[in-house]
Amino acid sequence: MSDTRSNGAVATTAHQDLHSEQGALRGEHPGRSRNPVVKVADLAWLEFEKPDLDRAEVFARDFGFQIAARTENELWLRGTFAGSPCTVIRRGRTSRFIGPAFRAAERADLDRLARATGTEVRDAGVPGGGSAIGLLDPSGLPVRVVHCAEQLPELPGQQPLLLNSGTEQRRTGAAQRPPREPSRIQRLGHVVLETRVFAQALDWYLDTLGMIVSDFLFLDGQRERGPSMAFLRCDQGALAVDHHTLAMHLGPGNGYVHSAYQVTDLDAIAAGGEYLNERGYKRSWGIGRHIQGSQLFDYWRDPDRLMLEHFADGDLFSCDLEPGWAPMSTSGLAQWGPPATRDFVGANPSPQRIRDVIGALRGDNEMDPARLLALLRAANS
């Protein structure tokens, strides 16, 4: 990507100051493409494989999903909002993430992508019908762009609790008793990926799918080497959208880190967390409030140790927000809440993690000993 900033040593605007203390320095990555192939509208769903669909369905219901469709070999999960399903889980030999599917703004965008990438428009294989393009990002991750023929109807949702705040007394003569039940998922919010080829992958999502960066993080003492993490949102012009739909960070592995699903409010997060805890599921980190994106969060592991997040009250920005820049550190992940756990930041050693590190240092990618040491310092900061 050749576009760079040249208007002053530090780019700052009143709009940018709303979410970040620092802007880009002269010549740093602009966080968007001059002429993307298309501009995707949102995530459509995420695709997984698991060997036991019955166990996957039990956790899905406990976590707060509704069942959109179920066959012998596929489980489609949804939230209460109208739209596409959140997740499809297909029967497979191991538990693994396959890839994300992004929603095309228009059916014609699929034809434009097909011409630009030398691919074909195929059947999406989604309940209700639709079309899809299959791509590979620079990390080798399958990425689909889809246009659905039908949208799922809205379902009854969890109502936010009526709160008394200071002199604003909206609830009188009634007690507050949030039910101990699953947090009712409203929609898919975002997915976080790790990649050894961060710069290539970042530019691919900007150039091919038209995403734009809300925030960059950089490693301590290595800002001149460029960002090591980016929070990307969809570009829907003046329409304010989620601070990030996709987040990516440099690391020794390639693939899934976690996915996030919106619920009603803090009480839904907390009561739903108690429900999960009572059923023996393991919290990875939470409850707290993030800095980049401002979401209230709570992270959990499913029975196969894949990480999922409940979130509420995230930032919404339109296309005119410039990227913020901040140092990458564990302590910089939250405004308040318990310290980030070793499980959440991936600092617990495992045979697979050791293999990832060895493979990354031996391979042709952006990982080198200096980057690895800086990532370790960030994880322990």
Image (tube, rainbow, N blue to C red):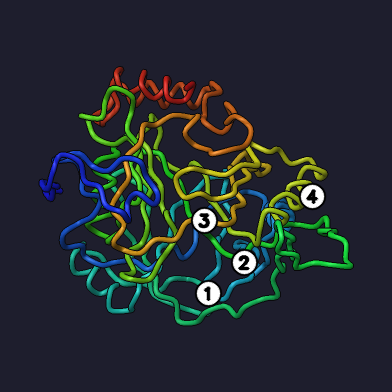
Residues at marks 1 and 3 touching, judged by CB atoms closer than 8 Å: no
Q: How far apart, in angstroms, are the residues tagged by discs 2 and 1? A: 9 Å
Q: Which of the marked residues, 2 or 3, is nearer the chain's N terminus?
A: 2
Residue corresponding to mark 3:
314
Q: Is residue 181 left or right of residue 283?
A: right
Q: Which of the marked residues, 4 or 2, is nearer the chain's N terminus?
A: 2
Q: Is residue 193 left or right of residue 55?
A: left
Residue type of the residue flagged with mark 2: Gly
Residue corresponding to mark 2:
79
Residue 239 versus residue 175: which sits nearer the camera?
A: 175
Q: Position of residue 116 (x, y in %)?
A: 18, 65
Q: Position of residue 370 (x, y in %)?
A: 29, 18
Q: Secondary structure at mark 3?
A: loop
**Disc marking residue 83:** 1
Q: Which of the marked residues, 4 or 3, is nearer the chain's N terminus?
A: 4
Q: Position of residue 189 (x, y in %)?
A: 51, 58
Residue corresponding to mark 4:
275
